[in-house]
Amino acid sequence: MNLVRGYWEAKDTADKLDAEIEKKRKAGYPLTNIIFEDTQTAVLYQHGQRIFSVDMKSPDKLAELVLQFFAYIEPEIEEFEHAVEEFKERVPDLAEGLKKRIDVAHRTNTKFKQAFAEFFELCQTSLNPNISQAAVDEMLIQHILTERLIREIFDNPEFVRRNVIAAEVEKVMVAMTSHSFDRNTYLRDLDRFYVAIEHAARTMTDWSDKQYFLNTVYERFFQGYSVKLADTMGIVYTPQEIVDFMCASVAEVLEKEFGEKLWSEDVYIIDPCTGTGNFIVNLIRRIPKAKLEAVYKNRLFANEIMLLPYYIAALNIEHAFFEQAGKYESFEGLCFVDTLDLADDKQGELEFMTEANSERVARQKAAPITVVIGNPPYNAHQQNENDQNRNRAYKVIDQRITDTNVKDSSARLRTALSDAYVKFFRYATDRLGERPGIVSFVSNNSFVRGLAFDGFRKHVAMDFDLVYHFNFKGNARTAGEQRKREGGNIFSNLIRTSIGITLLVRRRSKGSPRINYHAVADYLTAEEKRQYLHAHSSIGAVDWTQLAHDGKNNWIAGENEEEFAGLLPIGLKDGDNAIFEVYGCGVASNGDAYVYDYDAEKLASRAKQMVEDFNAQLDRWRRSGNRSRAGELVLC
């Protein structure tokens, strides 16, 4: 955050330092963290108090003073950091307490049951037909825990009443609190956290600082509140350097390849997974005031499926417009909807949460989108397979991937193609239709080299004329020297996959696509990578390497690949020109930890324990009233 951390007041030797300090004190100079010096003596004030003065000819004393000066942390920020960590620890307990109160309301509160039933039906028809009651309960909990933050940080007390989705959620909460439940009293334990945030927010006058600040709160909230939700939705905010680069690059390509501006009448832009709205905010700031209102009202769109980031996105975007245009306008281009559902034409017949939100969705679906930009979630699998927390299936998009990427892949194992970011690339390509346009995503790097992605690469080359890929490495799933070479992750240590920015351009020119590639150096830290990207303002400032697109849909050939391709294969799925006639994936226990070991006694003990654990869980399940033909395991 760009906060003032201290001041340095230099005087000349003709001045009397103590007298000058007194003048500055009376003039209202901030004495929170300031050095006064006259080239001979340096005096440090902190917290309004004179800490010490030193002879500037003494290197050790001067170094001590300077170190203390730079080590100073504003009380509000220090308090905020402590409070955020405390909140992260406390929020699961508070959320669990709220869940119990909601459970009671489900059983005993007639008004709440009626309001919830209506809201639940809206969520099923609008967001996810398979959404559970527990998931909708979580939305209510998010709303209760964060509504005060939204009001206070943005100084926008009318938001809940005015926002089309917040107002609908609030109806359910009003019904719940009608029976002797006071949310303010319940949340009193979080006052320290709320007050610390509010104090820190007041120290910020620049909106970009507030935006970064709130993104941090948002990320920490979900780290503490719902690890599973963070897993499936890939919750982590996009570093500003990435947002700047992508938005600047889109503006550059529009002008260079199409002779258009961000504000041209035939340029329609969508962020399909907007998070807290950072991409749209950045684009708004690039549009001249005279052109902004028309773009804002008619040609700018964004979608979000999670309640808290949807709230923050609405506030961020609307405030960015207010700053640029000098007046407030609700952002009608923001929809509370699952973008991947919109690939299904039948969804057009459904109501999306509220009539106002449905109108927004209908207007968006009718728009001739020419630019798709954003940061889609990327995770093919849940972190813990026991969580029953898998990514949701999407009938239309999944079938499109099967008909394209999967069909044209030579790989046998293609589960990586179920990654959410692959679905968003497919959505974005199909959303352009046959129109020229641009797709720009920051995502997992796996498609650049992965064997399972040969079909993906083939269709990217078929659908676009220009490909730019900026590789930031950072794969934490490697080991040894390779792990060191990957360096830090440009996002944060919460992301373990290698990251890259991809920009795809469709001009519909004839000929092979031009694939441009650039990778950061090895061993760089996360901060060094962000600085490196900042130094390259857009794709025009990057030294690209042009890659060949070979007949096997490889972009980056492995070492000795041609020589390897000439060798006799061990086995082939189709054909008999191989060492072995029988083709298969071999022994696949899918439970090697239980059935393989070098020590027979250890293996037997572990297998026995697995059987006992299974039978104990089966017995517990039966005692809970379930009936099944499932039998007990027997160790043979």
Image (tube, rainbow, N blue to C red):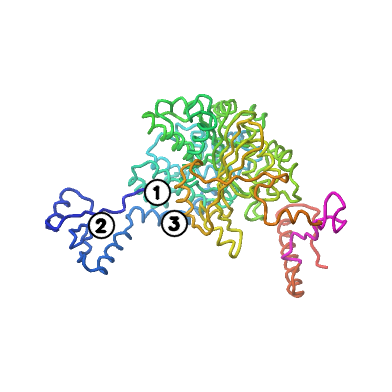
Q: Which callout, 1 or 3, points at the residue further toward the start of the chain?
A: 3
Q: Residues within 10 Å of mark 3 (few under 14, many from 20)?
A: some
Other residues around mark 2 within 10 Å, as few (<14) / some (14–19) / many (≥20): some
- Residue 511 versus residue 530: which sits nearer the camera? 511
User: Residue at label 3?
Assistant: 86
The overriding secondary structure of the stretch rendered in magenta is: loop
Write the start and end of the magenta stretch as one range.
569-595
Pick the residue in front: 588 or 508. Answer: 508
Q: Nearer the viewer, mark 3 or mark 2?
A: 2
In the image, is 415 to the left or to the right of 8?
right
The image quarter containing residue 436 is: top right
Q: Is residue 584 magenta?
A: yes
Secondary structure beneath disc 1?
helix
When asked about the image quadrant of residue 132, the answer is: top right
Residue that badge 2 annotates: 47
Q: Earlier in the sequence, mark 3 or mark 2?
A: 2
- Name the side, left or right, on which 351 lies relative to 453: left
* Residue at which label 1 appears: 194
